Amino acid sequence: MPDIVIRPLADAFMQVGVFVAVLVAAFTRLRSRHGDRLTGLLERRARLGPLIGAALGVSPGCAGALMVMPLYTRGSVSFGTVVAALAATMGDSSWVIFAAQPLVALRIHALLFATGLAAGYLVDAFGIAPRRAPEPLPAPGPAASPGGVALAARTTTPLPVAFWVTTALAAVVAVPTAFQLVPPEFLAGFPGADPYLVLGAAGTVLSAAVAIDGRRHPHRHADALTTGAREVAGIVVWVAAIYLTWEVVVRTTGFDGSQLPLHGLTGVVVGALVGLVPGCAVQIAFTSLYLAGAAPLPTLVANAISQDGDALLPLLARNRRPAALATVLTTVPGLLVGAATLLWLG
């Protein structure tokens, strides 16, 4: 039960939800304090968008690329910036390769940065800009009295408060875990239940409750805490569904990727196609195949460029068409660079 259900639910919140929540809170704070100045700065530096996106994406883990998605959703960066970040990221697979083969990891990440940079600028140069879903409008405010005083104030229900308290506690565990600052056995050594599993599963359950409440009361006048909680909750529910589905597929069918043909040009194609699968779980397993000697370097390169890690999931939850196009656009350079690597290595 913990491995099949609880673990995917916990991973969804601890690996993605916590970081999205931190970014949403930070961006909301900046926007409330500085208004349009932040957006204006990004718009004035629009030509640097793909460069910034590639630089954020190539950083180990998913956090850097995740930062770009809310900015795109709000219209602050170009679609090329998104493609640059997604092509440059290797997601959590980067931790695996850095731990085992740091020099190879550095070379791969340099290639990822160059590919993401080129792909991002090409997308913007060709004017590829899919239609974004508009940001949800704030719910109508309470009626005001003739003197201009609102008849009802914005209220925060206990549900979003519980969500943010759980998120804060989860961040204390999720951040050191994501950046490998603590060994896995450290958490396992806690008396009683594993805090990672407890906080992660609780966060996902609360996310589902917040998402359901938001659908039931879409026009309830909500404050910033509630609005932010709903934004993050919708993403977490999507991620949890994907993680849980993959876990069930692996457990029921035994398919984990190792059954695929991984050598030669066929392996490059397979690596790029596997990169289309959202999330980090499949990609970590695929990187492990390379470390085990089952997949050659060109296959890994194709997969590394094609995959989007967890960074695609927030975009998939809010803007499905741009997300689908972005993941296809990162697969194309994955195929090309993977094939070029195959030819170069002979």
Image: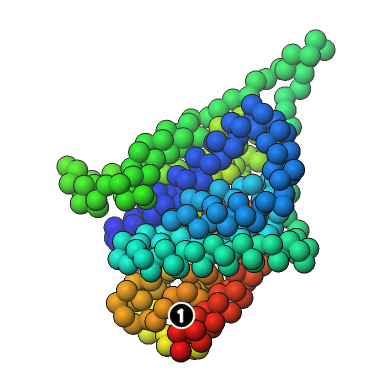
Q: Position of residue 155 (x, y in %)?
A: 59, 25
Check the image and report above or below for 219 versus 314.
Answer: above
Check the image and report above or below for 262 versus 314.
Answer: below
Q: Position of residue 230 (x, y in %)?
A: 57, 42
**Local SS, label 1:** helix
Whether residue 274 is visible to the viewer of this picture, yes or no, is: no
Q: Residue at x 66, y 41 (%)?
A: 218
Q: Residue at x 51, y 87 (%)?
A: 343
* Residue that carries the numbered disc 1 in the rendered image: 298
Residue in the foreground of this view, choosing between 273 and 293 = 293
Check the image and report above or below for 240 versus 227.
Answer: below
Q: Residue at x 55, y 27 (%)?
A: 156
Q: Position of residue 293 (x, y in %)?
A: 31, 80
Whether residue 345 is visible to the viewer of this picture, yes or no, is: yes
Residue in the foreground of this view, choosing between 104 and 100 = 104
Residue in the foreground of this view, choosing between 121 and 12 = 121
Check the image and report above or below for 226 versus 345.
Answer: above
Q: Residue at x 55, y 54 (%)?
A: 55
Q: Amino acid at mark 1?
A: Pro
Crowd rating for badge 1 (residues with CA inside 10 Å; few <14, some 14–19, many 20+)? many
Number of callouts:
1
Residue 327 appears in which quarter of the rendering?
bottom right
Q: Position of residue 245 (x, y in %)?
A: 44, 67
- Specify the farthest residue to the right: 146
